[in-house]
Each structure stands twice: as C-alpha cells, then as structure tokens.
Image: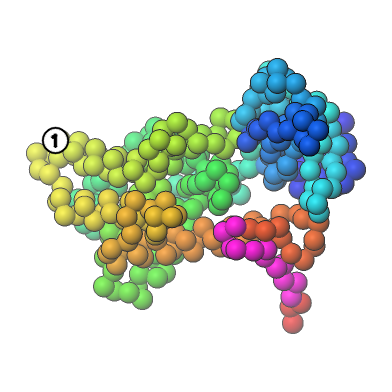
Amino acid sequence: MARIAIAQLREGDAVDQPFIIGGKQLGTTSTNKPYLKADCTDATGRIHCRMWNVPREQYERIPSPGYVQVRGRVETYQGHLQLVAENIARVEDISQLDLGQLLRQTSQSIPAMQARLREILQQIQDRDLAQLVDSFLSDGEFMKKFSASPAAQSMHHAWIGGLLEHTVNLLELALLICPRYPDIDKDLALAGLFFHDIGKTAELTFACGFDYTDEGRLVGHLALGAIWIHQRAGEIARRQGRPLRPDLLMVLEHIVLSHHGQPEFGAAVTPKTPEAIFVNLIDNLDAKTQMAIDAVAAPTEDAVWTDYKKAFGGSLYRPSITKK
C-alpha cells in the first residue's frame, strides 16, 4: 500500500504505514471500555488517532513518542479528520524508515543559513560580546545541535533546522529595523537574538518526533541560555585574565530571561530594557507570522477557515484575493 501523507489524507482512506505517535493517553468510553487517544504526525502534519478496546498490556507496548506502524481508516468526527486504528505496533527497525517522510525539515539550505548567521554576527563591534558570540560559533558540537534543532515542539518552526531558520529570520529583521531606532544598542540586540533560544538545543529532542527532554521540562530554555552565557563568560575570563563586563552580561542575560514578554507566556521576568523589549517584539513577530502561515496551509474540512487556534483566540481566514 502506497504511503499517504497526512496533508493528503481524506475521509475513507485506508492506511497501513508508519507515523510518529505522541501524546498517548488511555481513555474510557461511556460504557467503561478503554481506548487509546494520541496524535500521529509526519513531515506534512498531524492527525488525531483513536484505537478502541485497547487492553492495558497493548497500550503499554506502544511508545510515546515513538515510531509506529498504524493500520486503520480515516473518519470524520465533529467536523475534523481522525485516524481510527485497528492496530498500532512499535517499529523495531528504524533504519527501514524514510525519516524525511516523518520529520518535517526546513526548506532552506542549512549551510547557507549558517554562513548568513556568521556574516551578520560578525557585525558586532563590542569586544566582549564578539568574544562571547564567537565562543559558541566556534563550538562545533554546539553548532551541530543548533543547526539541526527545531525551534519548538509544535508552535512555530517545528522542524529540523527550525531554530537556525528562526534565528536568522530575527537577525535579518533586526538589520532592517535597527536603523529606524539608532538609540537601540545594535550589538546587544544582535547578540541577544542569537542567544535568546540557544537553550532549545537541550530543551528539545527530535530522536522520535519533537518532544521535551527532562532538562527542558525541569529547567527550560530561558534558564539554560542564561546559565550557558554565564559559564562561557567565566571560561573566557579565565583564558584572558580579564572578566567580561558584568553590567553587559547582566543586560544580555536579562534579554534571554525576558524574551517571552510576560510570565504567563513563560518569561522569567518582564522586559525592562529597550533591547529586551525589541527582542521580545520581533521574536513574537516571526513566531506568530509563521504560525499563521502554517495554520492556513494546513488542510481542514472548512476550505475557508482554519481550526481553532489558541494563540490567535479563534480560527483564521484563508483569503483568496485575485491579483489585478
């Protein structure tokens, strides 16, 4: 049976193919029978999955997250497509899978984005900031993770290379916007944008789909980023026999800790410098814009409106505007 991408699934389609499964839960029907509910994903999207009358022993054998073979049929429930599984089995030999079909990947060239990242960050004139940035850029293991990591589990740029793509987008935006605000410290803004999400290289894993690590759940990428900046600054100080400026490190770490804007959105503190406010706003601009683009591109039963999107407080409209 030929594989059908999630984006191409329609009501009545029969499938027997691999997916990434996540968010596994054991529910109970109104007649007190157990059933599995989860999400299945591939490189093109996500679909809710249900499997009825699941014994706990079978439920426990299904990984989450993990690679599974699902046999079932696509149905419509309350206006949304769902995959009703007849059987779900762990994929034992992952080498047989085409991971390019299952994990979404950036459409951009990773080497080209890496080169552009370095090109922009080389514009930083402040000696201490330049040394700190270079200590990460010259760390091959870190840059390997930074270039491959997603920027989120599911919200925005949730694909291989997404963190690099998101960061380069922000740096490009900064180059456009900074000339309009000459009182903004451009060096600090560029460094803050590079560092703002570096902790995601440890917060997120993509070994079996995109998920949070234990370190990500317990510490989080904001704290990790601030800790790493502090550690690298200490290493540089020991090598050169001179500390990096404490006031500079403080406002840089503040950018990382505050870039989510408000505590309800995950910020450790609210932004309290012009550069921190600047980073928060353009980070939100890129994230929300990409989320909106992804939302209207995803197939739904309604051809005009998307599903409900919590980030936007409702559904989004797909405009079809004739060019004149």
Query: Is 74 situated above or below 192?
Result: above
Q: Residue furthest front?
A: 31
In this view of the protein, which residue sits in the foreground, 39 or 60? 60
The stretch of residues the image draws in magenta is 310-321
Tell me: 186 left or right of 45: left
Q: Position of residue 51 (x, y in %)?
A: 78, 31
Q: Quadrant of residue 13?
A: top right
Residue sticking out furthest to the right: 12
The kind of residue tagged 1 is Arg
Q: How is the image coloured?
A: rainbow
Crowdedness of circle 1 by 10 Å Cα count: few (<14), some, many (20+)? few
Magenta stretch prevailing secondary structure: loop
Q: SS class of the residue under badge 1?
A: helix
Q: 173 or 68: nearer the eye?
A: 68
Q: Is residue 6 visible?
A: yes
Residue at the image position 48 percent from the left and 58 percent from the top:
169
Membership of 313 in magenta stretch: yes
- Residue 296 shows in this picture: no
| Left-right relation of 4 to 115 | right
Q: Residue furthest left?
A: 241
Where is mark 1, residue-wise? 238
- On whether residue 265 falls in the magenta region, the answer is no
Name the residue: 60% across, 57% down.
310
Number of numbered markers: 1
Quadrant where the N terminus is found in the figure: top right
Q: Quadrant of residue 191?
A: bottom left
Image coords of residue 28 (percent x, y): 73, 33
The quarter in which the C terminus is drawn is: bottom right
**Residue 278, position in %: x, y?**
36, 65
| Residue at the image position 21 percent from the left and 50 percent from the top | 249
Name the residue: 40% across, 41% down. Answer: 220
